[in-house]
């Protein structure tokens, strides 16, 4: 990484030059202003090296390419199967590993009751009937949940804090969130989102990228299955309505 990182290269250069200037200026020539200049260069070198270590290993363009490719592959799979059911976001306790989305392959007007952990397979069975099967897939929310420092509790304040730290801090895709809960319904308002929301078939099943993150983290916090009941853009805010199942 050093030979490709301009921040670290510049920092090392300033470190060497600053040392060569400040040491002789202070011990040999006793020139105050030249010593101060060398010390300033040393301070700048430490700052540049720290910035170099903070640069992501992958450029944002590469991350965007990987994200777009993954979404398109999921969209193609869902569209080819003709699935119209809404995804159910499961906590890690029901998905054995991490929060995942379960999409029933058959929609008969009722939601499937998932009370035990599903097997880690693409096509998973949740009941005894031949039609009790669906797709168990990882989403953006599955990965984003792992970026949290700790699992949030099942309260609006803790969920709001977790989402704000993730969206505004780690990911930088929004300015903040507001969470309101009423019975088994959760409303999340995302302020000034900077991530585009598509309208493909997969988004009708899974929801938008921001919604998948919200639903996955809420499912993990409440430790219950959750569905996305509604999404809408209002006055610079993206509003997501969730329903807790069970």
Image: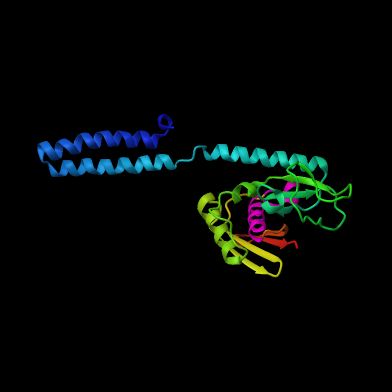
The answer to whether any part of residue 93 appears in the image is yes
Q: Residue furthest top?
A: 3
Considering every residue shown, the one lying at the far left of the view is 29
Is 175 displayed left or right of 113 in the figure?
left
Between residue 17 and residue 105, name the one nearer to us.
Answer: 105
Q: What segment carries the magenta color?
A: 198-222
Magenta region, main secondary structure: helix
The residue under the point 10% across, 41% down is: 30
Please say which color scheme the image uses.
rainbow
Total marks shown come to 0
Residue 200 visible (yes or no)? no
Q: Residue at x 72, y 62 (%)?
A: 244
Quarter of the picture containing the N terminus is top left
Where residue 56 appears, as percent x and y from the top left, is 48, 40
Residue 26 lies, in percent from the top left, at: 14, 40
- 46 left or right of 207 in image: left
Q: Is residue 212 magenta?
A: yes
* Magenta stretch contains residue 56: no
Name the residue located 85 percent from the left edge and 52 percent from the top edge.
Answer: 107
Quadrant hosting residue 13: top left
Q: Is residue 147 left or right of residue 135?
A: left
Q: Residue 191: horizontal and vertical position, in percent?
A: 57, 60
């Amino acid at each position: 990484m050093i030979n490709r990182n301009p921040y670290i290269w510049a920092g090392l250069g300033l470190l060497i030059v600053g040392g060569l200037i400040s040491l002789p200026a202070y011990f040999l020539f006793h020139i105050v202003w030249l010593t101060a200049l060398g010390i300033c260069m040393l301070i700048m070198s430490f700052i540049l090296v720290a910035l170099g270590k903070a640069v992501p290993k992958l450029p944002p363009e590469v991350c965007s390419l990987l994200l777009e490719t993954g979404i398109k592959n999921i969209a193609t799979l869902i569209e080819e199967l003709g699935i119209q059911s809404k995804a159910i976001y499961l906590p890690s306790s029901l998905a054995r590993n991490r929060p995942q989305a379960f999409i029933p392959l058959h929609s008969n007007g009722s939601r499937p009751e998932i009370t035990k952990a599903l097997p880690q397979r693409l096509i998973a069975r949740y009941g005894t009937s031949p039609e009790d099967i669906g797709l168990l897939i990882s989403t953006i929310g599955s990965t984003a949940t792992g970026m949290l420092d700790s699992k949030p509790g099942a309260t609006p304040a803790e969920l709001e804090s977790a989402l704000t730290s993730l969206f505004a801090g780690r990911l930088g895709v929004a300015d903040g969130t507001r969470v309101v809960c009423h019975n088994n319904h959760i409303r999340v308002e995302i302020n000034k989102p900077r991530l585009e929301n598509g309208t493909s078939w997969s988004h009708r099943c899974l929801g938008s990228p921001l919604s998948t993150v919200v639903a996955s983290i809420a499912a993990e916090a409440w430790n219950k299955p959750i569905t996305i009941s509604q999404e809408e853009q209002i006055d610079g805010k993206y509003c997501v309505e969730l329903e807790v199942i069970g």
